[in-house]
Amino acid sequence: MNRPTSTALAALSLLSVTALTACGGSSDPAPATDKPEASTSASAAKALSPAEHLAATIVTKADTDGFNVAEPDGEYAFAKSADEVTTDKPVCAPLARAMNQLPLGAPEADLTRLASGPTDAPTKLTKGVTFTYVTLASYAPGKARSAFADARKAVAACGDGFTARANGNESPYDSVTAEQVTPAGDESLGFTSTMTSRGVRHVLHGEIVRGGDVLAVYFSVDGMAIANARPSDARLSPTVVKAQNGKLAAGSGS
């Protein structure tokens, strides 16, 4: 790796339901004609933008039974936008994005949170302490399905690894394999990847779930193990994944 410290730190690095019910009818013809118009106006006033939908659907501390949930620190981000990332194998680009907290495809809005904890865990980051990143992205109709299909293709095609580059940093991934996950949303996909930093092997885990026109991308890493050159196998937090998948399903009407 060209810049192991940067790479290690970089590795650290739905629709909300608006169920609006029209008012009941009336035996008086005139008011009955007016009420659908009032309901239409109310619906338009309450419509949320893609960004607002994601803000209402993203997992929070209250959803995760003691985990800290916050915006990730962008100081050590591998890249600040997907446009900055290139791969030696173009088909693997969705995985490079998924493992660096960047949205897949071309969403209308996206939002990322970092879950760590739970809060009663030891204050010092020791062996086994991992971070689960959650990236939600909202798409125009049909685009989430397409982005998910590209990710599935990447997992199948990138088994012997690939290299991602951005802003002078380089992250070589040694292998990628499909991983069985609990079915969720309209379709779901799990994967495991490996990387070597300073001669030490690290196992990383990811999951992608589609709920309607929203994708939830999960990625977990033991950042301190990478920074301290200690082997790791970072698992996604079942608590965080279950909580976010639940909110995704509620928001997409699944």
Image (cartoon, rainbow, N blue to C red):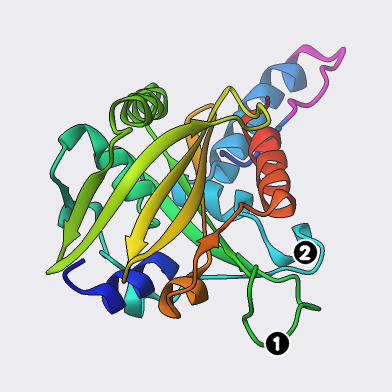
Alpha-carbon span between mark 2 and mark 1:
20 Å
Q: Is residue 219 or residue 177 the one in the foreground?
A: 177
Q: Is residue 24 magenta?
A: yes
Q: Which residue is mark 2?
A: 62
* 186 relative to 31 in the view: left or right: left
Q: Is residue 184 above or below residue 96?
A: above
Q: Comparing marks 2 and 1, which lies closer to the viewer?
A: 1
Q: Is residue 107 magenta?
A: no
Kindly give the residue lying farthest to the bottom in the view shown.
Answer: 123
Q: Residues within 10 Å of mark 2 (few under 14, many from 20)?
A: few
Element under disc 2: helix
Which contiguous range is marked in magenta?
21-29
Q: How many marks?
A: 2
* 28 relative to 4 in the view: left or right: right
Q: Residue at x 21, y 66 (%)?
A: 1
Residue 177: x percent and y percent?
43, 34
Q: Is residue 161 above or below residue 254?
A: below
Q: Earlier in the sequence, mark 2 or mark 1?
A: 2
Q: Which residue is mark 1?
A: 123
Query: In this orientation, does residue 76 appear?
Result: yes
Amino acid, disc 2: Ala
Residue 122: x percent and y percent?
74, 83
Query: In this orientation, does residue 107 appear?
Result: no
Q: Residue at x 67, y 33 (%)?
A: 249
Q: Residues within 10 Å of mark 1 (few under 14, many from 20)?
A: few
Element under disc 1: loop
Amino acid, disc 1: Thr
Q: Is residue 71 or residue 46 the one in the foreground?
A: 71
